[in-house]
Amino acid sequence: MFDQLKSQPADKILALMQAFKDDPREQKIDLGVGVYKNAEGVTPVMRAIKAAEHRLWEEQQTKAYVGLAGDPAFADAMIGLILGDAVPREAVAAAATPGGTGACRQAFELIRMATPGARVFVSDPTWPNHLSILSYLGMDVVPYRYFDNETGGVDFDGMLADLRAARAGDVVLLHGCCHNPTGANLNPVEWQAVIDLLNESGLIPMIDIAYQGFGDGLEADAAATRMVASRVPECLIAASCSKNFGIYRERTGLLMAVSQDTAQRKLNQDTLAFLNRQNYSFPPDHGARLVTMILNDEALRADWMAELEDVRLSMLSLRQALADELQRLTGSDRFAFLAQHRGMFSRLGTTPDLVEKLRAEHGIYMIGDSRMNIAGLNANTVPVLARAIVDVGV
Ligand code: PMP
């Protein structure tokens, strides 16, 4: 049996991480893997998570199974965080999942089950896991134009033109905020135009929101998701707690199915529970429980929000510093888009050859499509990166 297996393509980001580790140069800079790092290069456990873990250790009496959809209190807390009061609670079915990846996987399976012929429209580029899971599930994927290499912003006309090719029942995958890998996002007017198109063509939006609080703030980052959820008849929302709670390895996420027809909710809820059972039965609980404790406790929540805001502001100031330094070195505004981008990533918009040159000549590691993890920088490395970008002739 095993001899029938074919070797699978290596994950490019993990391969890059290994190459970085193996690089003996002291001045090397890792802008590859997508985890937040502070100025010391550490991905810390957040204070509120530590406090909640301590409390949980003292108070938890059992580790018996929870429900197939996870603890309903986790769903309630997360729906509050993401959707606020944009839709009535009765409109939302939700299930805990292993991370945002699990939420995406379950969403794709639900789409395939409900509408076997549905195509999934994805931004070009999108998070590579979207593509690999969709392809593994044998689903039809159609890319829509998204990033404009010239301006560093969104090619919005191209995006709308490509989405006009979608048919009723097709799904449009959108990043709720902090687009990965580009950092370029729609403005509210553009979101409304997308919503109008979804409604005119009978398309179903699926929103992946993995960086709430990393862009313009917790509320602002949820605004587009709320707008969509309240203005379309149905949507799917895949949320991750990995980044904004810093609990990557705890595998904490939530899939929401929102329907304005609230009579639909029970069927949706049962389907989400069914899909969890088929794939892993009960979803992980530890991270979900910590998140629930934090969101439902005034002091823990305030402390979490304060720390998350510090994380957000530190990335914004690194963006600004990099854009300023490049402006100083080049005498042009060519790189001003880096300060406009939001979230952890920015796509520089250069060729794989120059990305390789940055690695070979300067020990700067970014993904081949020129995605940089801004959190991989600090005040000392910003000028080093800026000089290298100019040096290799980006
Ligand atoms: N969606 C996007 C766009 C992401 O960038 C990520 C994290 N890399 C996720 C979902 C899910 O992450 P996780 O499974 O670690 O929660």
Image: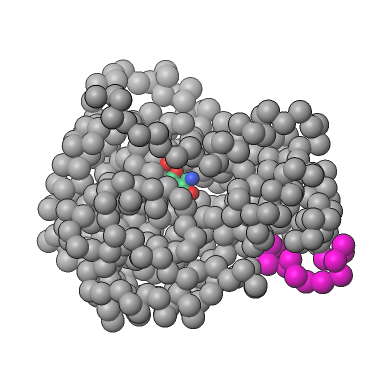
Is residue 97 among the parts visible in the rendering?
yes
Choose between 40 and 58: the one closer to the eye.
40
Is residue 342 among the parts visible in the rendering?
no
The color scheme shown is one colour
Labels in figure, total: 0
Quadrant of the image occupied by residue 208? bottom left
Choose between 255 and 336: the one closer to the eye.
336
Q: Which residue is painted at 61% across and 31% down in the image?
A: 18
Residue 337 magenta-highlighted: yes
Residue 10's x, y, as percent? 48, 37
Residue 282's x, y, as percent? 24, 31
Left or right, residue 313 beside residue 168: right
Residue 308's x, y, as percent? 58, 45
In this picture, is 234 found above or below 22? Answer: below
In this picture, is 155 found above or below 40? Answer: below
Quarter of the image where the C terminus is located = bottom right
Q: Which residue is painted at 24% across and 24% down in the image?
A: 1
Left or right, residue 42 beside residue 363: left
Q: Which residue is painted at 26% across and 41% down in the image?
A: 72
Residue 332 magenta-highlighted: yes
In this picture, is 166 found above or below 111? Answer: below
Quadrant of the image occupied by residue 25? top right
Part of the protein shown in magenta: 327-339
Residue 199's x, y, as percent? 29, 77
The residue furthest front is 3
Left or right, residue 91 beside residue 339: left
